[in-house]
Image: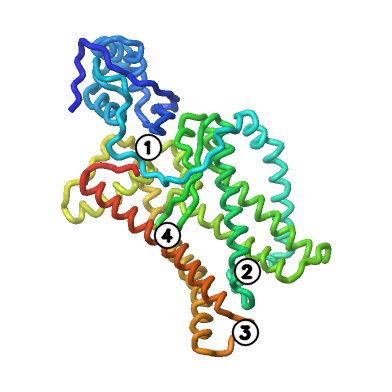
């Protein structure tokens, strides 16, 4: 336990802060550590940063807010995260005992100026993308049959070639999606990094932009939705290409048309994935921002575990510090969380498994020497096996490791809300 004397000042290490209603966000950009604290707590922290003693800061707090703060618990929590220390402590920020787990390979745009990023995210640029998207929607209503389905990825000839081409273009699309987040974050003056991670059993690209919580709500919304806007714009361009080919304006060779259709369907899959708000997707963070909830996913997990603990008559995780308004949002989100799992399984059985089953059947038929429509060669078999091993196998391994890590953290603190 860290000791803070009332007759001594407190060492407050550098931080940036933003008030947001009843709460405030403080952050250390260098360490990428950010905390949400009560707005009154920021008053106390700012007085301590001025150099007054802890007793004087408490007196000012009581005068302004007509109540006594629990300074011991408050300062100990800040000390654990490296924001404060007792007087006389070394003026060095200690390394956290369990630093946030981040992939080692990251990429950023810190060299881009904020003004350049703001131009790329300006209203004229966004409006132009909106016009293109609107045109695509009108054309899709006129000819809905052009919208591709899962069969657009069921290639009967040259599977290996189509697979790698579509996969390569899709990877470019994923990169542009994350690039949108990074540029929007830079437009708010926030550093952001692209890294590789996982969501459940899926390997995903992720943008680390924790500092966006120090930006205004409008800037946060833009940074969170930027990737989806790029996905929608890209899908619109692909559909317009198919429409122009269908009406005879373009004369695309059949292989090119198949690649365009397959790539467009992967765009639909990525957009559908973002609606899985029971995972930490873009739309989840947008909802959490709109509801002004600081740790919606973690608090919902604790709430659901408490429901199970009540049935099993076990001690509950303390959620007394959650405001009633936030708890109402948590109860509603818990229903969304459960229904989301059901939707995820439905997508798995209606789209992913049928597609995999189609190719598994072709692999089996190939080895049995049966007649196949189109062609299926050793190159196709190897491409299918490699893709399954890298994407499905790699994602599964990362998921298992993340589950093991979460299990270890919960065993160390079984009655705490863990924000990972």
Q: How many marks?
A: 4
Residue under label 3, please give it.
373
Instruction: Tell me which numbered mark, 1 or 4, is placed earlier along the sequence.
Output: 1
Q: Name the image quarter holding residue 298.
A: top left
Instruction: Tell me which numbered mark, 4 or 3, is placed earlier along the sequence.
Output: 3
Q: Are marks 4 and 3 in contact (CB under 8 Å)?
A: no
Element under disc 2 = helix
Coordinates of residue 416 in the picture (x, y in percent): 24, 42
Taking 168 as reference, is 325 above or below it? above
Instruction: Tell me which numbered mark, 4 or 2, is placed earlier along the sequence.
Output: 2
Q: Name the image quarter holding residue 49.
A: top left
Q: Are marks 2 and 3 in contact (CB under 8 Å)?
A: no
Instruction: Tell me which numbered mark, 2 or 3, is placed earlier along the sequence.
Output: 2
Callout 1: few (<14), some (14-19), or many (20+) C-alpha neighbours within 10 Å?
A: few
Residue under label 2, please give it.
162
Query: Gap in Å between the C-alphas at discs 4 and 2?
Result: 22 Å
Residue under label 1, please give it.
325
Image disc number at residue 311 = none
Element under disc 1 = helix
Residue drawn at x 50%, y 47% as measured from the top left: 282
């Amino acid at each position: 336990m860290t000791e803070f004397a009332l007759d001594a000042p407190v060492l407050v290490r550098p931080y940036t802060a933003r008030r947001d209603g009843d709460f405030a966000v403080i952050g250390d950009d260098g360490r990428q550590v950010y905390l949400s604290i009560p707005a009154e707590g920021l008053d106390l922290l700012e007085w301590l940063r001025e150099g007054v003693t802890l007793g004087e800061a408490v007196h000012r707090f009581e005068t302004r807010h007509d109540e006594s703060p629990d300074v011991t618990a408050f300062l100990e929590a800040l000390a654990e995260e490296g924001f404060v220390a007792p007087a006389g402590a070394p003026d060095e920020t200690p390394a956290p005992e369990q630093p946030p787990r981040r992939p080692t390979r990251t990429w950023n745009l810190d060299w881009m100026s904020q003004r350049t990023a703001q131009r790329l995210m300006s209203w004229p640029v966004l409006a132009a993308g909106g016009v293109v998207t609107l045109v695509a929607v009108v054309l899709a209503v006129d000819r809905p049959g052009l919208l591709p389905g899962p069969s657009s990825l069921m290639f009967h000839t040259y599977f290996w070639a189509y697979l790698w081409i579509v996969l390569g273009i899709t990877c470019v699309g994923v990169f542009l999606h994350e690039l949108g987040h990074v540029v929007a974050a830079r437009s708010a003056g926030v550093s952001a990094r692209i890294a590789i991670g996982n969501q459940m059993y899926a390997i995903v690209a992720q943008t680390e932009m924790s500092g966006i919580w120090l930006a205004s709500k409008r800037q946060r919304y833009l940074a969170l939705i930027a990737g989806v806007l790029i996905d929608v714009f890209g899908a619109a361009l692909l559909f317009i290409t198919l429409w122009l080919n269908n009406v005879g304006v373009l004369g695309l060779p059949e292989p090119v048309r198949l690649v365009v259709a397959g790539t467009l369907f992967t765009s639909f899959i990525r957009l559908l994935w973002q609606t899985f708000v029971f995972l930490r997707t873009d739309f989840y963070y947008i909802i959490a921002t709109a509801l002004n909830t600081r740790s919606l996913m973690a608090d919902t997990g604790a709430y659901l575990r408490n429901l199970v603990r009540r049935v099993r008559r076990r001690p509950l995780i303390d959620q007394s510090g959650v405001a009633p308004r936030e708890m109402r949002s948590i109860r509603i989100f818990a229903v969304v969380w459960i229904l989301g799992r059901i939707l995820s399984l439905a997508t798995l059985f209606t789209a992913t498994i049928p597609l995999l089953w189609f190719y598994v059947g072709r692999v089996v038929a190939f080895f049995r020497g049966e007649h196949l429509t189109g062609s299926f060669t050793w190159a196709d078999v190897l491409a299918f096996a490699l893709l399954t091993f890298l994407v499905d196998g790699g994602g599964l391994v990362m998921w298992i490791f993340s589950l093991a890590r979460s299990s270890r953290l919960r065993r160390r603190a079984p009655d705490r809300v863990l924000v990972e």
